[in-house]
Amino acid sequence: MVSPILLIAVPLILAFSVPLWGLIHKKLEKFVPLIAFGFNTYLIFRLLPFALTERTISVVIANIKPPFGINLAVGPFGLFFALIIQLVALATAFYLLSYDPPEPSDKFYMLFILLVLGSTGMVLTGDIFNLFVFLEITSISAYALTAITKTGPAAEAGFKYLLLGSLGSTLVLLGIALIYGSLGTLNMAHIAHRISGMDSRLVVAAAILFIVGFGVEAEMLPLNGWVPDAYQAAPIPVVALLSGAVAKAGLYALARVLYTLIGMPNIIMLLLTFGILTMFAGELAALRQNDIRRLLAYSSIGQMGMIMLAFGAFGVNSVFGGVLQAFTHGITKALLFLVLGVMALHTGGATDMESLRGFGRKFPYWSMLFAVGVLSTLGLPPFAGFWSKLALIIGVIIDGHPTYAALALIATFIEVFYFARLLSVIYSSKLSPKLVERSIRNTTIPLLSATFLAAIIIAVGLYPNVFFDLGDSASRALLNRAHYIFSIIGHYLQSMGGV
Amino acid sequence: MNPEALGKVIFYGSSIALFLIGLYIILVKRNLIKLILGLTFIESGVNLFLVSIGYVWGRTAPILNKPELMETPSKLAVDPVPQALVLTAIVIGVAVTAMALAIAMLIYDKYGTLNISKIKELKW
Amino acid sequence: MIRNIFALLLILVISVFLASSIASIPFGTEKTTVGKYYLDKTIEETGSVNTVTSVVVLYRGFDTLGEVTVLFLAATGLGAILFGLREKRKRKKERPSLIMRTGTRYLFTAALLFGAYVFVHGHLTPGGGFPGGVIVATAFLMLFLAQEGFRVSEKGVKFVEALAGMTYVAIGIAGLLLVGSFLGNFLGTGIPNKLASAGIIPLIYITIGLKVGSEITGLLQNMRETTEYES
């Protein structure tokens, strides 16, 4: 087996090397993200057969076995999220080839690689403090990339994100301190093994700190004020990553901490409440939006809420649905934003509905790609979103929460309203005066990268078997705490005679 | 008061106090620089808490450069892990603060003010 | 006003919540299994007498790689955001004082040497790559303050930064190839308390020292130049 550590080491060395490429030739820089994520995608596909089993393996770092050293805990659940992140990153890195980044361009590419690297690290690590470090790598590069266009709104959005984000990660650090203070260990499997002996008030306090802290990245309700502003002001490729990589990594951290580390049903059920509130807040706010970026941002919040609801229902069927929904949401939102980026090229940068009225009449292929994304989000066959939404709603019903399934259905109806309005504007027969015939730039490369994402959505929709298998082993692996603990620190527990 | 309770009040108490002062600043103040200050207060509170978790009565720093320390280190030295964690956390805190100040400079350049209630576009 | 009262109430609730949970963590007692292991095994396994260093660089070395990346991110992000930003108001410029100029002339080399000493001896004494790097950057800060118009070469800073970062990851990958584990110690432990001991720890701390030194220097230059009028 190839070492999963290369998923982190290779992009890191490439990120450090970006200025050196620029010294050779300025044009070479933009290929570095593509090389990094092309390599990573190749690695992920090499590791995928492994993700179909239910095993978790520990990859030892610095030759020190867990619980004493830091290790990567590579299992189906983490690999599934790593797959989502890599696919979105690959499509976006390809898109970057025809994109003029804000100056200084070398720094833009470095931040871009490190953003993906941080979220990949978050979903692979097996150590709670290491998770915090990767969270910081992800979020600091996200703050910088949000503000990088250096306009007023971008600076505001960046500051808002930074304030909430660093408050959240400090809370995570406090939660880690509480756990270390009472258990004296940082390895997640070791903590999970011992948490039953911890003072229950402390467990609840740590759990709340983690939920609130990771909730910032996962776009959870009280702390998601940064989402619409950041989605509106950040460069388009960055927005694709914010929903495709950062939100997914935050969601992974929430699920991993609550299911594996804490593992108490009544604490996990807290996610249900947060999920429902987030879902309705997002979907209802989306109804009123006129700017498509903001509309998609609120829709993203709503979808994340729905996924949290599924994770909060605490059952293998609903987690299965949640995991699949996370995949389709990541890919679909990335597709929608990349297409929106090209749409904006034809209106001089405007993304409000009126400027894009009638876009579909003039550019049928682009609008078709956009429609694929919209229909998949709504959960219509034959797109991937159909299977994931179906699995989510049926899963929540099977796990004994029909009311919550009904709420998710209501949220979907709200989605139908605003997306129908959006599509009717895009396919309207009246033309917006702002639309221009030809964009300023050649759009072949964005076309290929958007087609790639749309092809994934359709392929998964038509042949969902592998997708189901991956989601199935991912959800089983998440719920199988005992196996996770044993495969990471089994040797240690045996040597202590404590199995 | 027994020494343990006293230690708790002094060290845990002051780290919680720092944390809360920072939180209050963030909730109430309107000036970007003060908000950043609030963030560093919170970070310091958590760092102080982490270090004080690692302290053990009557023990010395975990640098084993004396013969008696080398023989039974785990009976004479304090826990090194929280110190290593705080080292990492401090560096991260510096990075966040630097980034925050840079964005604040950018905001000042665009709007000519550091007061967030005067920046019209912002919906706080 | 309502805002203040609301904030105070929230603070009150949080303080009760935090105090009641934190109070159950004992103070001044030993609570760790991991830390005990590190103290007992550090000399045997790593050869470093400074346990904090062995934890930072070897046992939890992956965190430190992340930490270096975070600092790199801060320098990069700052450079990206402040790019092209110049203060519009012209401010009166004062010539640095005689004391500053003369003092810096003598202290600069001493500070550079001291910084290097701190990061080379990280496995023996308190200190290490991060403080050492910051001391090196302080030497440059003195030059910024004492000499008008002094700048470091931007290309040079970039080059040192990139090379040091890549060396760090390369040491990690060398561990993967030679001993089968990323960041593994492939050099043996040596005799404790000697300068040439503790395997890859001094190597890593030297790369960290250079990286931190060049990053903070670049960061200071960036912040300084945006607050000066264009000359």
Image (cartoon, grey):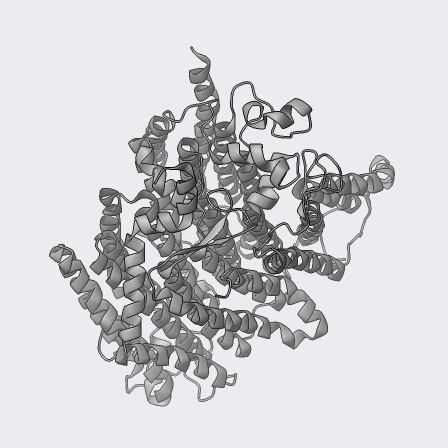
- Rendered image quadrant of residue A35: bottom right
Q: Residue at x 45, y 74 (%)?
A: A91
- Rendered image quadrant of residue A74: bottom left
Q: Is residue A219 left or right of residue C228?
A: left
| Residue farthest along the top direction in this orientation | B1
- Rendered image quadrant of residue A23: bottom right
Q: Which sits in the foreground, A414 or A67? A: A67
Image quadrant holding the N terminus of chain C, namely: top left
Q: Position of residue B16 (x, y in %)?
A: 43, 29
Can I make out residue C210 in this image?
Answer: yes
Q: Is residue A195 left or right of residue A115?
A: left
Q: Residue at x 81, y 41 (%)?
A: C113
Image quadrant holding the C terminus of chain C, namely: bottom right
Q: Position of residue A371 (x, y in %)?
A: 30, 80
Image: A324 above or below B13:
below
Q: Position of residue C45 (x, y in %)?
A: 61, 41
Q: Which sits in the foreground, A223 or B101? A: A223
Q: Is residue B41 left or right of residue A402?
A: right
Q: How many marks?
A: 0
Can I make out residue C90 in this image?
Answer: no
Q: Is residue A334 left or right of residue B87?
A: left
Image: B31 above or below A86:
above
Q: Residue at x 22, y 78 (%)?
A: A381
Q: Which sits in the foreground, A484 or C68? A: A484
Q: Residue at x 78, y 38 (%)?
A: C114
Image: A354 above or below A199:
below
Q: Which sits in the foreground, A247 or C206? A: C206
Q: Position of residue B49 (x, y in %)?
A: 48, 31
